[in-house]
Amino acid sequence: MSTTQTPQRTPASSSTAPVPPAAGSSSATLGLTVLRVVLGTTFLLHGWQKFTEWTVAGTQASFAQMGVPAAELAAPVAAVVELVGGLLLVLGLGTRVVAALLALNMLGALVLVHLPAGFFAAEGGVELVLLLAAASALFVLAGAGRWSLDHVVAAKRRAAVRA
């Protein structure tokens, strides 16, 4: 008989809790990609709406009525940031910079327009813009993920440095 014993697993020591995926795992990559595409599409469509449905002039008037400072400049800037930024986010190109601009855009909307209305979006509150700002902040911190043009560009740069 051996004097060393193999530790036995008891029900109390075995874990049945799910282990979160590692940052580079395929499930994390899929999650980042889904969120990036949905967030980018949301911004793209809001920017498109400011150009086509509301028009830039209508958006400027709306911004002025809501008390947004420099509405004549803020409206077209917001429209461009949302339209172009949303498209770039969908593609995963320039993601960290684009996401920072989108987060700032939403924080401006939160402070200047939505905060006095409380939390819920149905009452004009911060709910939606806070969620959009937080999701944008995720991409500032995490980047676009493996399934993005940012990843392709970075891989090409690494290959060029090695060559």
Image (cartoon, rainbow, N blue to C red):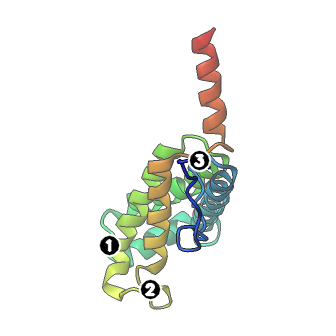
The quarter in which the C terminus is drawn is: top right
* Frontmost residue, 54 versus 104: 104
- Percent of width and height locating residue 124: 44, 85
- Pointer 3 or 1: first along the chain: 3
- Pointer 2 or 1: first along the chain: 1
Which residue shows up at 60% across the image and 67% down it?
A: 18
Kindly check if marks 2 and 3 are in contact, taking CB atoms under 8 A apart as contact.
Answer: no
Please name the amino acid that badge 2 sits on.
Gly
> Relative to 34, is 121 above or below?
below
Q: What residue sits right under mark 2 in the picture?
A: 124
Which residue shows up at 39% across the image and 70% down it?
A: 109
Please name the amino acid that badge 3 sits on.
Ser
Numbered label attached to residue 2: 3
Q: Can the viewer see residue 61 in this picture?
A: no
Q: Which residue is farthest bottom?
A: 123
* Frontmost residue, 129 versus 148: 148
Helix, strand or loop at mark 1 = helix
Label 1: few (<14), some (14–19) or many (≥20) C-alpha neighbours in 10 Å: some
- Percent of width and height locating residue 142: 49, 48
Q: What residue sits right under mark 1 in the picture?
A: 112
Where on the picture, by quarter, is residue 118? bottom left
- Percent of width and height locating residue 10: 58, 70
* Frontmost residue, 6 versus 142: 6
